[in-house]
Image: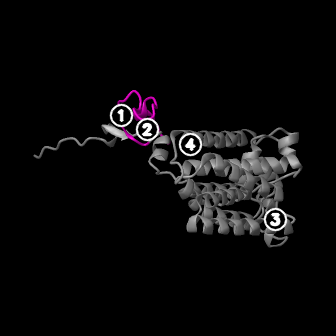
């Protein structure tokens, strides 16, 4: 029989990158000698945060999957009322009641009923097959780009806050009901525009021009389509621009522990909002 020496687990490494400054530090260190972060070894092994620190998380595909799952759920909640006609933009549209139960946003649920969580949940819902296909196409088109330039943690913060700001602005202005991820997508346009302008050079300038073209095209479409929520787009674009300005991007400053902590708080907020959706899902409508 052969004898095998036990292999040392990766979790028992003598040193790890500090979650804040990324300098190597002992896993047993009381405090990072470079930046002063307490217990860096313990923090770097916390679930989810560990994956964020190692750059092993991508949110884009998960967001696309959740949006499609909620779209199918909305169709299934009220199958008899699914729209099969009324033009291409109304093909396979879930019923208004189904969308309302799943967290449709707008002035009515937010202002008059106090369902504050709808400023987030509305950004995951879609009103027709074409609606979700267009939004998810753009999310996949530029989402991975923004995630690479800003980092996964900053991406989910930008995406979420842009959508919330867009939905909030539109609701307060008086849009009665709204759904869709387009406010968040416009926030990604704003983030790319900021990055291109700030970085400069050939790459930055080209990206800046491309972001301007995308944004102008999107706003032009919003103006000439009565079904599109222009204020949600405006709010999302401004929100994405301002949040990305505050957070910075990878070439300017690598993600720190505080960016990752912000991402965890953002995920907790998303989960809370959908827990509230579940709590009200089967209550009778007033």
- Alpha carbon of mark 4 to alpha carbon of mark 2: how far? 14 Å
Badge 3: how crowded within 10 Å, few (<14), some, or many (20+)?
A: some
Q: Name the residue under label 4.
A: 259
Badge 2: how crowded within 10 Å, few (<14), some, or many (20+)?
A: many
Label 4 with label 3: CB-CB less than 8 Å: no
Q: Quadrant of residue 89?
A: bottom right
Badge 1: how crowded within 10 Å, few (<14), some, or many (20+)?
A: many
Whichever of labels 4 and 3 marks the residue nearer the N terminus, that label is 3
Q: Tag on residue 222?
A: 3
- Alpha carbon of mark 4 to alpha carbon of mark 3: how far? 33 Å
Q: Tell me the magenta residue range.
A: 22-48
Of all residues, the one furthest to the left in this rendering is 1
Whichever of labels 1 and 3 marks the residue nearer the N terminus, that label is 1
Whichever of labels 1 and 4 marks the residue nearer the N terminus, that label is 1
- Alpha carbon of mark 3 to alpha carbon of mark 2: how far? 44 Å
Q: Tag on residue 27?
A: 1
Q: Is residue 70 above or below residue 281?
A: below
Considering the whole magenta stretch, tell me its main secondary structure. Answer: loop
Label 3 with label 2: CB-CB less than 8 Å: no
- Alpha carbon of mark 1 to alpha carbon of mark 4: how far? 21 Å
Of all residues, the one furthest to the bottom in this rendering is 88
Q: Name the residue under label 2.
A: 44
């Amino acid at each position: 029989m052969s004898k095998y020496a036990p292999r040392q687990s990766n979790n028992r490494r003598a040193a790890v990158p500090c979650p804040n400054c990324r300098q190597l530090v002992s896993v047993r260190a009381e405090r990072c000698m470079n930046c002063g972060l307490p217990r860096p070894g313990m923090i770097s092994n916390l679930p989810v945060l560990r994956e964020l620190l190692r750059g092993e998380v991508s949110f884009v595909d998960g967001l696309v999957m959740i949006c499609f799952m909620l779209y199918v759920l909305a169709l299934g909640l009220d199958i008899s009322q699914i729209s099969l006609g009324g033009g291409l933009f109304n093909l396979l549209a879930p019923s208004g009641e189904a969308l309302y139960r799943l967290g449709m946003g707008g002035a009515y649920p937010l202002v008059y009923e106090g369902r504050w969580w709808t400023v987030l949940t509305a950004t995951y819902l879609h009103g027709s097959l074409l609606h979700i296909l267009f939004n998810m196409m753009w999310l996949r088109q530029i989402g991975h780009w923004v995630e690479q330039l800003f980092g996964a943690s900053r991406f989910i913060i930008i995406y979420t806050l842009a959508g919330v700001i867009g939905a909030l602005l539109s609701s307060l202005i008086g849009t009665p009901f709204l759904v869709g991820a387009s406010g968040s997508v416009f926030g990604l346009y704003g983030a790319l525009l900021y990055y291109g302008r700030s970085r400069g050079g050939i790459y930055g300038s080209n990206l800046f021009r491309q972001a301007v073209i995308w944004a102008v095209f999107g706003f032009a479409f919003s103006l000439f389509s009565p079904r599109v929520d222009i204020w949600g787009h405006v709010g999302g674009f401004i929100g994405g621009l301002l949040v990305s300005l505050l957070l910075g991007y990878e070439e300017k400053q690598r993600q720190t522990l505080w960016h990752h902590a912000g991402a965890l708080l953002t995920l907790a907020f998303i989960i809370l909002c959908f827990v509230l959706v579940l709590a009200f899902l089967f209550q009778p409508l007033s």
